[in-house]
Image (cartoon, grey):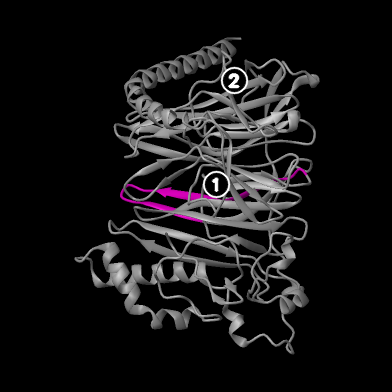
């Protein structure tokens, strides 16, 4: 009895501490948010000039991350909204709406009056009622210098049939936040976690809210049991049984003045409505078996046609006293909620006959078997590791796991493919975090994201597609714009490309690390830059020749 009372007292103390921290953060961030509100109001004034819907065919969207990519419930379309981009000096936030037509392989920019303010790290959920609705909650706006943040607590709905935005004002909802997660559950939106940050303070959340799509009302849920610790950027998906899975995420805490320690969570929880009731919920921690993903943050999530959860990429940060190593990933994992088991997503490789017939053709959106991917015939997965060194000595490790093709992926000896193809890597997304994922008609679409090279953030604008039924190969729908670097010749091996372009990459490296850097560091940086560009270029050819895919 005494132990139980002590435990309850401890729990109440933790709640009081969290409440005090939230009040402290709120007070300190209020002045920052007031400053940013003026800037947001300015942008809204510009948006108010739009009085009618304008749809303009356009080229693919500019590079961005932390946007939302959603599938239209009735059309073969992907809907891209918001996001952010940092060019090394200035942060840009977007509230643009783009539509990608899958069948036509074309982009359209859709300007609709009275849109939500510019934001990133929000959540978007599509529901089928009324011809399709896209619900958006929260997110953040950042000052141009990236030092101040405004966290939204607004709720919007885009009526897809009429192409109209509507702000839904309902009291009792979540506080302002970003990095939260939201899913559609029956006729409700269920929201979990996130964080709020000011210049000096931050707080992470583990609260749960429900928004009723019939009554347009918010309610805060109080599940029984022990749930996840506060976090952002987690996986949140609905199982076929109607339960909700929470996996992983990121949080940080202050260990001493001006020193924070981040945690990449790898635990999993089940949120269940008790006895089918929509009012009472319970938390249960679960321990899945199988090939679990390594701990990471910034991963992307989608739901496969068989109700398995799909996890892609992310970054594993190893924090030390003097440096921070970021290990960016491009691996694929599946979680089966029925079997409570993780599986590694290994690609089979293209079939030999299709590879011979369609070798060298550009990807077509109509099917995953229309893109040729050239790869080694090794039977074991190949892990390629490259390092990029910044001027301050920070080492960024970029790891790329190349799946081993099966027997069907091996070429016959009488094939007319040249021997130079043996060293060309298969086409696949480069390692990255904070990319956008969506699944339509059994195909996974991946757009954008970022990785870091020292202090340099590289933001991507490419679009890939993977047929989840065949699991053979990625195909490129939109390539990242190249820089002015020496192009990789068709079939050229890295061992040949490096000496041919050495002087160019040495000049780039000296610009990157500074004129006073030791020659050894310059050489190491030059090799890393060259290999990063080569890996992004090799294997991506059109019928007219090479199309390099370089760093931006």
Q: Mark 2 points at which residue?
A: 168
Magenta stretch secondary structure, dominant: strand
Q: Do the residues labelled 1 and 2 touch (CB within 8 Å)?
A: no
> Would residue 521 be visible to someone looking at this image?
no
Q: Reply above or below: 1 against 181.
A: above
Which residue corresponds to the image point at 63% horizontal and 54% vertical from the top-left?
106
Comes first in the chain, label 1 or label 2: 2
Q: Reply above or below: 423 against 135.
A: below
Which residue corresponds to the image point at 80% horizontal and 33% vertical from the top-left?
241
Q: Name the residue under label 1.
A: 295
Q: Residues within 10 Å of mark 1 (few under 14, many from 20)?
A: some
348 vs 5, nearest the viewer: 348
251 vs 530, nearest the viewer: 530
Q: Residue furthest bottom?
A: 414
- Side of 135 where 497 appears, left or right: left
Q: In which quarter of the image is residue 184?
A: top right
Check the picture and name the quadrant holding the N terminus: top right
> Would residue 390 be visible to someone looking at this image?
yes
Q: Residues within 10 Å of mark 2 (few under 14, many from 20)?
A: few
Determine whether the residue tagged by mark 2 lies in a helix, strand or loop.
loop
Q: Distance between the residues labelled 1 and 2?
A: 37 Å
8 vs 410, nearest the viewer: 410
- Side of 395 where 170 appears, left or right: right
Q: Give the range drawn in magenta.
A: 307-328
Which residue corresponds to the image point at 72% horizontal and 81% vertical from the top-left?
411
List x then y, in percent, for residue 59: 54, 55
């Amino acid at each position: 009895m005494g132990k139980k009372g002590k435990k309850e007292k401890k729990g109440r103390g933790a709640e009081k501490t969290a409440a005090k921290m939230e009040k402290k953060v709120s007070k300190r961030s209020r002045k920052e948010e007031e400053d940013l509100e003026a800037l947001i109001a300015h942008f809204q004034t510009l948006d108010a000039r739009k009085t009618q819907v304008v749809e303009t065919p356009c080229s693919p969207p500019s590079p961005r991350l932390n946007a939302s990519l959603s599938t239209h419930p009735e059309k073969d379309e992907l809907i891209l909204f918001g996001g952010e981009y940092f060019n090394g000096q200035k942060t840009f936030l977007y509230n643009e709406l783009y539509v990608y037509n899958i069948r036509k392989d074309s982009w359209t920019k859709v300007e609709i009056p009275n849109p939500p303010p510019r934001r990133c790290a929000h959540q978007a959920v599509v529901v089928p009622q009324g011809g399709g609705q896209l619900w958006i909650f929260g997110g953040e706006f950042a000052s141009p210098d990236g030092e101040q943040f405004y966290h939204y607590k607004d709720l919007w709905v885009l009526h897809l049939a009429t192409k109209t935005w509507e702000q839904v004002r309902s009291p009792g909802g979540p506080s302002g936040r970003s990095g939260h997660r939201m899913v559609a559950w029956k006729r409700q939106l269920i929201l979990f976690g996130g964080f709020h940050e000011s210049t000096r303070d931050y707080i992470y959340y583990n609260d749960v809210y429900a928004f009723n799509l019939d009554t347009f009302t918010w309610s805060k849920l109080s599940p029984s049991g022990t749930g996840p610790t506060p976090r952002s950027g987690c996986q949140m998906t609905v199982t076929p049984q109607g339960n909700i899975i929470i996996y992983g995420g990121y949080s940080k805490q202050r260990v001493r003045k001006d020193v924070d320690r981040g945690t990449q969570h790898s635990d999993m929880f089940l949120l269940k409505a008790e006895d089918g009731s929509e009012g009472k919920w319970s938390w249960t921690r679960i321990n899945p078996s199988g090939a679990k993903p390594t701990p990471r943050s910034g991963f992307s999530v989608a739901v496969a046609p068989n109700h398995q959860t799909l996890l892609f990429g992310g970054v594993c940060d190893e924090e030390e006293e003097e440096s921070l190593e970021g290990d960016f990933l491009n691996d694929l994992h599946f979680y089966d909620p029925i079997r409570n088991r993780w599986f590694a997503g290994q690609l089979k490789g293209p079939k030999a006959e299709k590879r011979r017939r369609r070798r060298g053709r550009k990807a077509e959106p109509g099917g995953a078997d229309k893109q040729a991917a050239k790869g080694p015939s090794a039977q074991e997965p190949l892990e390629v590791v490259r390092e990029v060194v910044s001027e301050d000595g920070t080492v960024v490790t970029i790891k790329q796991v190349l799946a081993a093709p099966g027997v069907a992926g091996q070429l016959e000896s009488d094939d007319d493919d040249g021997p130079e193809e043996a060293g060309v890597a298969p086409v696949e997304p480069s390692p990255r975090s904070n990319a956008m994922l969506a699944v339509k008609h059994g195909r996974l679409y991946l757009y954008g994201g970022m990785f870091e090279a020292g202090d340099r953030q590289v933001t991507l604008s490419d679009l890939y597609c993977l047929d989840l039924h065949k699991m053979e190969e990625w195909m490129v729908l939109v390539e990242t714009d190249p820089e002015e670097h020496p192009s990789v010749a068709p079939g050229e091996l890295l061992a040949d490309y490096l000496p041919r372009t050495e002087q160019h990459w040495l000049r780039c490296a000296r610009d990157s690390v500074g004129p006073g850097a030791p020659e050894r560091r310059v050489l190491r940086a030059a090799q890393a830059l060259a290999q990063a560009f080569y890996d992004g270029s090799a294997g991506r050819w059109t019928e007219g020749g090479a199309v390099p895919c370089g760093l931006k």
